[in-house]
Image: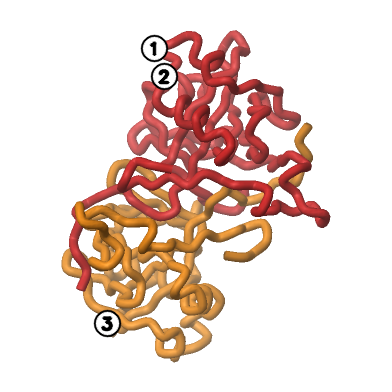
Chain colours: A orange, B red
Amino acid sequence: MKKNLGAKSWIYPEPVLIIAVYDENNNANAMNVAWGGIADENRISICISPEHKTLKNILVKKAFSISIGDVKNVVACDFVGIVSANDDVDKMKKSGFHFTKAKNVEAPLIDELPFALECKLISYDEKSCCCLGEIVNVCADENILHHVGKIDLIKFEPLIYDPCNHDY
Amino acid sequence: MKKNLGAKSWIYPEPVLIIAVYDENNNANAMNVAWGGIADENRISICISPEHKTLKNILVKKAFSISIGDVKNVVACDFVGIVSANDDVDKMKKSGFHFTKAKNVEAPLIDELPFALECKLISYDEKSCCCLGEIVNVCADENILHHVGKIDLIKFEPLIYDPCNHDY
């Protein structure tokens, strides 16, 4: 017999997706999103509301990266989720994250996070807040790969968000 | 310096979502989906192609449940992902899963899986394979809750899918 908990936005596991994008002056910005997932072969869907600076930048640049938050960088990953660049112009400096331009899209990669998706914007729907991206490349630091060139989950420790208890 | 791995449908963690639905004769059926996530306040998005029996049933019943695969039931969760009810009419009997009708929607809950979302169909888009559902209730077995009525991740062990190595 199951206990009813009401209408909640909870699935397990929820990922910790760090979206990074350049603004109109080519300054890198990043934010933390838990509502998203693979939406089809080589497509990712992210729920992001229109007031976010990140979303405005995505609509200008038509590109973004999604890095996967990991255990080693939990403080910085959380920080970019709770502080908005609309309120604090020094957000990225304070986060401790550093950026390098992605090879395949006009978007920054976060140096500290070892796994990332390079994405081109397909569409954004303001009503549903659905930002749909084409995954044009996946890239990873050598030190999270095992010898056959695949992701090694002993070396790579992705964060998992617990939406019920607001914890990682 | 990151190594390029090509255009892949990989994020970490990917969930193991077991969708359950009644067919036109009110027989319960279930399948395993990794491509999905929370899409907005009380909404979930699932990528499911039109040939699946589950999808046909969702379009008839306008309702479905999503249970979260857990460690204890990994064999059954994997089984309902690799066998289609289009090919094996005894799929559900062989899976070992048992069903009880959900309280709030016309869909079955899986008795063996302790956490589930009850969903109403909002829309299905054949082109993108995007099935959008409204989460009308979340329900959980008492034995995965701690004393304040929240999910206890010591007691509940959700499966995590590793899309690169095809493993849990």
The residue that disc 1 covers is B87
Q: State left or right for residue B118 relative to residue A22.
A: right
Query: Which residue type does callout 1 highlight?
Result: Asp
Of A125 and B58, which appears nearest the observer?
B58
Query: Which residue type does callout 2 highlight?
Result: Ser
What is the x, y in percent for residue B54?
48, 23
The residue that disc 2 covers is B84
Looking at the image, which residue is at 43% across and 67% down? A69
Instruction: Residue A5: tell me if it is visible.
Output: yes
Q: State left or right for residue B74 relative to residue A64.
A: right
Looking at the image, which residue is at 49% across and 15% down? B91
Of A56 and B154, which appears nearest the observer?
B154
| CB contact under 8 Å: marks 1 and 2 | yes
The residue that disc 3 covers is A26
Tell me the quarter of the image containing the C terminus of chain B: top left
Tell me: residue B119, above or below residue A157. above
Query: Which residue type does callout 3 highlight?
Result: Asn
* Same chain? Circles 1 and 3: no
Closest to the camera, between mark 2 and mark 3, is 2
Displayed quadrant of residue A31: bottom left
Measured in 3D between alpha carbons, the distance from the residue under mark 1 to the one under mark 2, in whole angstroms, is 5 Å
Q: Is the residue marked by circle 3 packed among few (<14), some (14-19), or many (20+) residues within 10 Å?
A: few
What is the x, y in percent for residue B34?
43, 40
Measured in 3D between alpha carbons, the distance from the residue under mark 1 to the one under mark 3, in whole angstroms, is 53 Å
Q: Chain of mark 2?
A: B
